[in-house]
Image (spheres, rainbow, N blue to C red):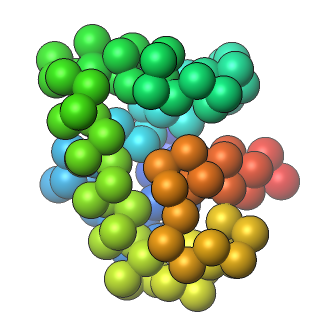
Amino acid sequence: MVDRHVENKLRSLGLMGNYQGYHCLVYSVHLIQGDPTYLDMATKRLYPEVARCFDMNTGSVDSAMRTAISLCCTRCGAQVTQMCGGKSRPTVTEFLHGLVEQLAE
C-alpha cells in the first residue's frame, strides 16, 4: 500500500510522516486512485474507510487531514494554491482532487 510518489509529493509540500493526517492522506489517495468515486462522497464513503484502517472515528480523520493540509498551506502555500486550482485554503476534497490530478500527470 505504500506509495512513494504520494509520500514524496506530500513531503515536497512540507508535510512529514509524523502527522496522523499524512498517513490518512496517503491512504485516501490510494483509495481514490483505485476508485475515483471515493472523492464524490468523502464524508459518507472515504472518511469511514480511512477511519477503519487507522482505528479512528470519522471526525478525527477529517480533523487530522485538515490539520495536515493547513500545514502544507503554511509551508508551501504557492504550490498548494497552484495544485488546487487557485484555492489558497482548499477543503480536504479539493486538496485530494488536486493531489490525485498532479500524481496522474
Q: Residue at x 42, y 42 (%)?
A: 25
- 28 or 47: nearer the eye? 47
Can the viewer see residue 30 in this picture? no
Q: Position of residue 11 (x, y in %)?
A: 42, 65
Q: Quadrant of the C terminus?
A: bottom right
> Eyeballing the image, is 44 above or below 9?
above
Q: Residue at x 44, y 27 (%)?
A: 43
54 sits to left or right of 31:
left
Give the number of callouts: 0
Instruction: Write down the quadrant of residue 35 in the picture.
Output: top right
Residue 44 falls left or right of residue 57: right
Location of residue 72 in the rendering, given as x and y in whole percent from the top left corner: 40, 71
Across and down, in percent, residue 3 comes to 51, 37
Q: Nearer the viewer, residue 15 or 41?
A: 41
Report the front residue among 58 and 102: 58
Q: Position of residue 6 (x, y in %)?
A: 53, 48
The answer to whether residue 50 of the structure is visible from this angle is yes
Q: Eyeballing the image, is 45 above or below 104?
A: above
Locate residue 92 relative to residue 104 in the image: left or right.
left
